[in-house]
Amino acid sequence: MEMRRKDREVVSIEKIYDILERCDTISLGMNGGEAPYIIPMTFGCTLENGQITVYFHSAMGGRKWEILNRDPHVCVEAHLYYKTVQTEKSVTALYESVIGTGVAEMIEDRDEKVAAFKIMLDHYKQSGFPASSCKGLSAAGVFKVVLTEISGKHNIPNESL
């Protein structure tokens, strides 16, 4: 779908990734059956060959687990809200946001799980913690989502921040 406000569209994948990297949580949207289900998540992400991949972990039970196993198609949203400002004719929010979709794939291989944990630890500036000794490594399901559709949007005039 084409973005209505082209003046706010972020088209560079590198700039979209930069926004995502600066976010501290994602909202993970899933097909909950009778109604959508959305949950805030800690995460990590990578940008390789023009493709953004998002990683997150989950307990191997509960509502999110059941939904992902039934329908792994997801939507990932992240945003940074700065402030609301007045202009001559209106009030507007200053923000940056990313929305992407893909399929959540559970990582089975232990080495790949460790690498995903490291990506998540790095995102939260915890690179010194050895990912291979994370308590949750064996108790959690680790997922990756290659974002097949992605868009970025912002409203951040330089003089406003």
Image (tube, rainbow, N blue to C red):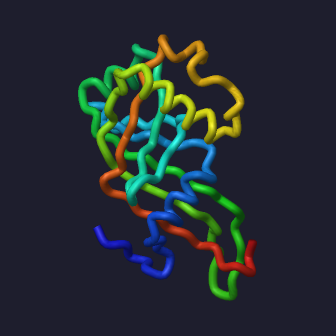
Relative height, residue 121 to residue 133 (above, below): below
Residue pictured at 34% horizontal, 41% vertical: 74
**Front-lying residue, 92 or 107:** 107
Residue pictured at 30% horizontal, 36% vertical: 31
**Front-lying residue, 51 or 94:** 51
Q: Where is residue 106 in the image (x, y as percent from the top left)?
A: 34, 27
Q: Where is residue 134 in the image (x, y as percent from the top left)?
A: 60, 18
Q: Where is residue 151 in the image (x, y as percent from the top left)?
A: 41, 63
Q: How many labels does the image show?
A: 0
Residue most toward the front? Answer: 111
Q: In the rendered view, does 113 fall on the left or right side of 70? A: right
Residue most toward the bottom? Answer: 88
Relative height, residue 136 to residue 95 (above, below): above
Residue pictured at 38% horizontal, 76% vertical: 4
Relative height, residue 121 to residue 157 (above, below): above
Q: In the rendered view, does 80 fall on the left or right side of 62? A: right
**Quadrant where the C terminus lies?**
bottom right
Q: Quadrant of residue 144?
A: top left
**Front-lying residue, 55 or 91:** 55
Residue pictured at 63% horizontal, 68% vertical: 93
Q: Position of residue 126 (x, y in %)?
A: 69, 33
**Quadrant where the N terminus lies?**
bottom left
